[in-house]
Amino acid sequence: MKIRTGMTSGAACYTVQSGDSLSKIATKFYGSGSADNVNKIYYSNQTTIGTNLNLIYAGQKLYIP
């Protein structure tokens, strides 16, 4: 049985933990919390996060490209 997730090969799904920020998540996955890496996550999840990239909530599921 094949299950389609809509994720590209090499991508991950991350569940936001209490105390996380996009910078911390970028560091975890890319080794750097640079603005480019933060924006990569933000723009891939803009509909989930909303207009304020500094406001994420524990339990949110984010796509990590």
Image: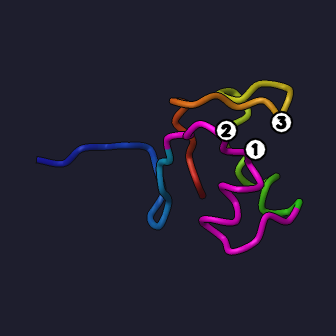
Q: Nearer the viewer, mark 3 or mark 1?
A: 3
- Residue under the image location 70 percent in, 60 percent down: 26
Q: Residue furthest left?
A: 1
Which amino acid type is shown beneath numbered disc 2? Answer: Asn
**Residue 22 inside the magenta-drawn segment:** yes
Please, what secondary structure does the residue beneath circle 2 have?
loop
Nearer-N-terminus badge (3/1): 1
Q: Which residue is mark 3?
A: 54
Q: Bin the neighbour count of mark 1 within 10 Å (Cα to Cα): few under 14, some 14-19, many 20 and up.
A: many
Could you say which disc has been placed on residue 42 in the image? 1
Name the quarter where the C terminus is drawn: bottom right
In x, y percent, where is residue 49?
A: 71, 29
Q: CA distance from mark 3 to mark 1?
A: 10 Å
Q: Which mark is residue 21?
A: none
Mark number for residue 45?
Answer: 2
The answer to whether 55 is drawn above or below residue 29 in the figure is above
Image quadrant assignment for residue 17: top right
Q: Are marks 3 and 1 in contact (CB under 8 Å)?
A: no
Asked if the residue under mark 1 is in contact with the one under mark 2, i.e. CB atoms within 8 Å, the reply is: yes
